Amino acid sequence: MAQREAEKLRREFEGVTSRQGPCFRCDLKERATRWIVEQRATGVTAAELATALGLAAGTVLRWSRDVSAGPTRSRALVPVVVIPDSVVVRTVTVVSPSGFRAEGLSIAEAAALLKALE
């Protein structure tokens, strides 16, 4: 079955006159890609598949990777929302010798308080 499918696909690929750009029909490429992925899963090398189909080994590798990336793979730009890291606010508690206590101050606020109390 695999040999027959390879021969059938090869004949269809040979019928394509121009091989620049997206020259293969979508249905042909999809059938070939499914077959390539099935054969790769059984251990057949990309070079062997390329020879069987009359394609470049790079094409066979690219098509098998395209399928493994999933059907929703796209090169379209998508909007991105950047969420800043949460800011960690360090607080301190200042306790005076007389028992005066100031809690939840930032370091800058604590420094300003101590300077004002001098």
Image (cartoon, rainbow, N blue to C red):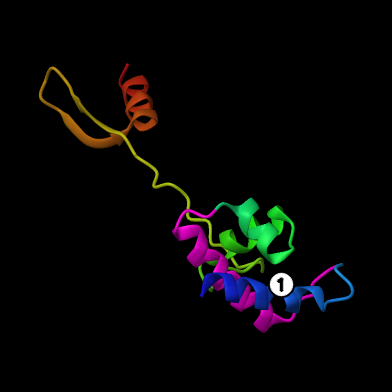
Q: Is residue 85 above or below residue 99?
A: below
Identified by mark 1, the residue type is: Arg
As helix, strand or loop, the secondary structure at mark 1 comes to helix
Q: Is residue 74 left or right of residue 87?
A: right
Residue drawn at 53 percent across, 71 percent down? 2
Residue drawn at 47 percent across, 53 percent down? 43
Residue 3 position in % (x across, y down): 57, 70
Q: Is residue 9 above or below residue 66?
A: below
Specify the segment rendered in magenta.
21-44
Residue 42 position in % (x across, y down): 44, 58
Decide: few, some or many residues near mark 1? Use Cα within 10 Å; few <14, some 14-19, many ≥20: some
Residue drawn at 89 percent across, 75 percent down? 17
- Name the foreground residue: 77 vs 51: 51
The residue tagged 1 is 10
Q: Is residue 49 above or below residue 10?
A: above
Residue 32 position in % (x across, y down): 62, 73
